[in-house]
Amino acid sequence: MRVTPLDIQNKQFPVRFRGFDMQEVSDFLEMLREEMEELLRENASLKEQMSRAQTQIEEYRHLEDLLKETLVSSQEMVKEYRENARKEAELILREAEISSQKLIQDAQDRVIKIHEDITDLKGIRRHYREELLRLLENHRRMVDFDIEHTREQETDDAQGG
């Protein structure tokens, strides 16, 4: 059975001959009642503080769990970003390699075309040179013929003519 300050205050002791001094007993019981009330108030206050502390601890634990989840989530996101960046870098490299190979092939094709054009131009130059030489040769013959024909006419004119 729990004793309350009210139990102490209401407690009555039978009076006997040569018993305790009633005033001292009353004073002592009053002091006990006050002390017990103080202890009960302090106990209630401590329980309330403990309850608040427990609530705070629970809140901190919840925050800690949230922080842990956030940290794990952040780490996973960083891992995903790194993986995506690596894949994107690989893709960019592959595209650059393909592009550079295409550029090299185009350059090689142009070099081949230029060599073909040079060969064609050399052939055309040789053809025009031969044509020019033939034309010059024909003109030289025509001039020689004209010179010879003019001499013949001058000889014919001088001989009788």
Image (cartoon, rainbow, N blue to C red):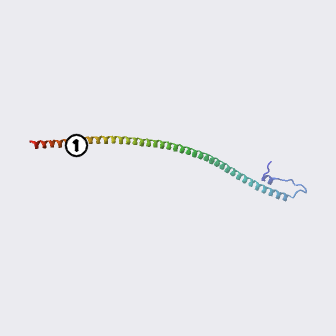
Q: Quadrant of the C terminus?
A: top left
- Tell me: residue 30, above or below residue 72: below
Query: x and y percent of residue 152 in the render?
Result: 14, 41
Residue nearer the viewer, 140 or 120? 140
| SS category of the residue bearing label 1 | helix
- Answer left or right for 38 relative to 103: right
Identified by mark 1, the residue type is: Arg
Displayed quadrant of residue 104: top left
Quarter location, residue 154: top left
Say if 102 sits above or below 39 in the image. Answer: above
Q: Residue furthest right?
A: 18
Horizontal side of residue 98 vs 34, given as left or right:
left
Q: Badge 1: how crowded within 10 Å, few (<14), some, or many (20+)?
A: few
In the picture, measured across the screen, residue 55 lies left or right of residue 74, that is right
Estimate the x, y position of residue 78 in percent, counting from the top left. 57, 46
Residue that sits furthest to the left in the current view: 161
Image spot of residue 61 (x, y percent): 66, 48
Please tell me which residue lies in front, 24 or 121.
121
Which residue is at 42% across, 42% downward? 108
Residue visible at 13% across and 43% down in the picture: 155
Q: Which residue is mark 1?
A: 140
Q: Nearer the viewer, residue 35 or 125?
A: 125
**Residue at position x 21%, y 41% in the image:** 141
Q: Position of residue 56 (x, y in %)?
A: 67, 51
Q: Quadrant of residue 107?
A: top left
